[in-house]
């Protein structure tokens, strides 16, 4: 079924969803003169309460607001990325401006952040998307409507002091589109392996639905240096698209197929300025229409293989992980399984990252109004994976850190961690997450929910002043082996938010010890037993940081030749 909505219809639906019985609020648009408005004075210091030391399992996270929740009113989408030096960049927006925030180091401390409003905007569909080049310089892509009849995609960049003064940014409108071609989330744009910006938006002209792939090779603040490739996707009507690149700079696109109420995938492997070099396919994955907002996420691993997390339309609020290791344009090469964690009936609050070993990490909100972080530690693309869960923040955590008393005549004030997470990992696999929270209370005799505070929240694992020790370390690997053959073992620590870096010390019977420093939540070691070194061997590993040490071990039986188990079958004797 084809479902295209005009901008007016979309915003009307959006306001009904956000209201949820709350008292009506009016938002006045801020017009954009010549596409953008400079903010002459910027406050470089973010608003933040003191860093909370949350209790129990959440103690490893430092958390703060980017703006005062009592006076700010952001839309729910944000985007966070980590640069090659470990600096963190975040963008978000409200009814007036796009904001950019940056921290160079020790980013669990809000005092180390700078924040600046960049451009005036007048729509809830801005969806600012960040990329950071190899020099740590931010590139921003967003959608805006400078007038009621203009709908544009913009590119902006800054090369120095980017969070101190908005005048250091340059922007340009790179595509004028119709009112149906707005983005659904912040995944619509990305930088390739040469730091060139690209974005995708729907080709909505009947009957040739497809993908508009917009790209620039150099001089990208000049509009004429951008060009568009229109890719027709037969039998598919792509919308709400997300763009990612493999290590060779080849584009991969995941989107919502409005024709089939499911996910679609597209890719190009060479000469991508030629539309016929693209391929597309409808995936055997149904999602609800509302799931198109934030109900799925795409990443590509170091081998160029796509990884997806999504909420499935057939299974209500069930969260899934999916992958393809070969020829992803063939539906039979896609596989998935359910992640058995609390669901989200809103379908739209999940993000995916891949750690330094290519394993998936997912941030998602639940119906319990908590924000969770889960990581796969072993067998991720099999039917027997191992996942660990950690709460980034619960409603009780936030209520304890920043209670807001009820207004006169109202009761039951509470914080809601609604989610819409943007997840990024640093080189040591420490997660940083930006997400949306709001505060509500029951008013008018309990018949109405009134929301009286909201903000974009930031959480940083390992940012607490109280380091978290490894609670356990579990080595895994083969149980049988032969001499003169190398065997690799993997050690995984828990909790997943133990403070990094971790030092791993490996010892194997009869072999030299190995010490690996500066590691993240897992490590590998390879051992080879020489001729004559047969028998039962013990592999021991310790994982330590400044807070403590955990120990683990496993055994492997080494023989001269492979052990073959003979299975005898005894058949009953038949007497004739």
Image (cartoon, rainbow, N blue to C red):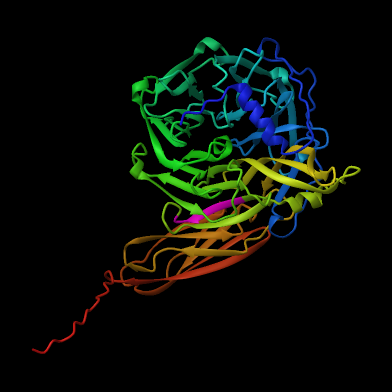
Residue 49 versus residue 155 in the image, above or below: below
Coordinates of residue 259 in the picture (x, y in percent): 44, 31
**In this view of the protein, can residue 306 be seen by the observer?**
no
Of the pair 285 and 252, the residue shown nearer to us: 285
The residue most toward the right is 408
**In this view of the protein, can residue 191 be seen by the observer?**
yes
> Which quarter of the image is occupied by the C terminus?
bottom left
Coordinates of residue 433 in the picture (x, y in percent): 65, 42
The residue most toward the left is 576
Residue 244 versus residue 430 in the image, above or below: above
Quarter where residue 106 is shown: top right
Q: Is residue 217 magenta?
A: no
Residue at 59% across / 31% down in the picture?
186
How many badges with numbers are in the image? 0
The prevailing secondary structure element of the residues shown in magenta is strand
Residue 547 lies left or right of residue 441; in this view the side is left
Of the pair 498 and 390, the residue shown nearer to us: 390
Residue 95 lies left or right of residue 85; in this view the side is right
Coordinates of residue 102 in the picture (x, y in percent): 69, 33
Residue 366 versus residue 145 in the image, above or below: below
Of the pair 273 and 554, the residue shown nearer to us: 273
Residue at 48% across / 18% down in the picture?
217
Magenta segment range?
A: 373-379
Coordinates of residue 317 in the picture (x, y in percent): 56, 48
Of the pair 40 and 210, the residue shown nearer to us: 210
């Amino acid at each position: 079924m084809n479902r295209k909505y005009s901008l007016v219809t979309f915003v009307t639906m959006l306001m009904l969803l956000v209201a949820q019985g709350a008292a009506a609020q009016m938002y006045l648009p801020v017009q954009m003169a010549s596409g953008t408005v400079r903010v002459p004075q910027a406050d470089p210091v973010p608003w933040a309460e003191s860093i909370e030391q949350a209790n129990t399992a959440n103690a490893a996270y430092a958390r703060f607001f980017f703006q005062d929740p009592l006076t700010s009113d952001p839309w729910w989408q944000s985007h966070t990325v980590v640069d090659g030096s470990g600096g963190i960049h975040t963008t978000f927006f409200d009814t007036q401006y796009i904001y950019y925030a940056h921290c160079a180091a020790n980013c669990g401390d809000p005092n180390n952040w700078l924040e600046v409003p960049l451009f005036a905007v007048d729509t809830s569909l801005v969806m600012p998307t960040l990329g950071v080049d190899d020099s740590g310089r931010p590139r921003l892509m967003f959608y805006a409507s400078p007038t009621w009849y203009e709908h544009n995609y913009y590119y902006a960049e800054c090369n120095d002091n980017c969070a101190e003064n908005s005048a250091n940014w340059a922007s340009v409108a790179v595509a004028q589109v119709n009112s149906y071609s707005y983005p659904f989330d912040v995944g619509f744009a990305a930088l390739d392996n040469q730091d060139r910006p690209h974005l995708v938006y729907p080709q909505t002209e009947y009957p040739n639905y497809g993908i508009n792939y917009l790209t620039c090779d150099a001089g990208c603040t000049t509009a004429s240096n951008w060009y568009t490739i229109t890719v027709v996707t037969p039998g598919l009507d792509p919308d709400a698209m997300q763009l990612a690149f493999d290590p060779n700079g080849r584009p991969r696109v995941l989107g919502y197929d409005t024709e089939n109420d499911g996910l679609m995938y597209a890719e190009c492997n060479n000469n991508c300025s030629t539309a016929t070099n693209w391929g597309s396919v409808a995936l055997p994955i149904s999602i609800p229409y509302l799931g198109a907002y934030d109900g799925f996420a795409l990443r590509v691993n170091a081998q160029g293989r796509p990884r997806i997390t999504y909420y499935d339309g057939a299974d209500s609020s069930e969260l899934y992980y999916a992958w393809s290791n070969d020829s992803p344009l063939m539906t039979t090469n896609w596989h998935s399984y359910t992640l058995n964690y609390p669901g989200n009936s809103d379908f739209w609050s999940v993000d995916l990252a891949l750690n330094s070993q290519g394993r998936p990490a997912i941030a998602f909100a639940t119906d319990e109004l908590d924000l969770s972080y889960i990581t796969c530690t072993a067998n991720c693309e099999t039917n027997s994976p191992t996942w660990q869960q950690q709460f980034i923040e619960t409603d009780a955590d936030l209520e304890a850190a920043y209670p807001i008393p009820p207004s006169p005549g109202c009761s039951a004030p509470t914080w809601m961690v609604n989610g819409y997470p943007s997840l990024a990992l640093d080189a040591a696999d420490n997660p940083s997450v930006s997400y949306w929270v709001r505060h509500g209370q029951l008013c008018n005799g309990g018949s109405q929910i009134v929301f009286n505070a909201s903000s974009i929240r930031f959480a940083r694992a390992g940012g607490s002043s109280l380091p978290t020790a490894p609670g356990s370390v579990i080595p895994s690997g083969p149980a049988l082996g032969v001499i003169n053959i190398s065997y690799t073992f993997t050690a995984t620590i828990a909790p997943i938010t133990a403070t990094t870096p971790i030092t791993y010390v490996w010892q194997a019977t009869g072999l030299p010890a190995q010490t690996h420093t500066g590691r993240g939540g897992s490590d590998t070691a390879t051992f080879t037993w020489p001729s004559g070194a047969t028998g039962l061997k013990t592999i021991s590993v310790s994982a330590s940081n400044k807070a403590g040490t955990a120990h683990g071990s496993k055994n492997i039986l080494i023989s001269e030749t492979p052990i073959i188990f003979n299975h005898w079958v005894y058949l009953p004797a038949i007497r004739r």
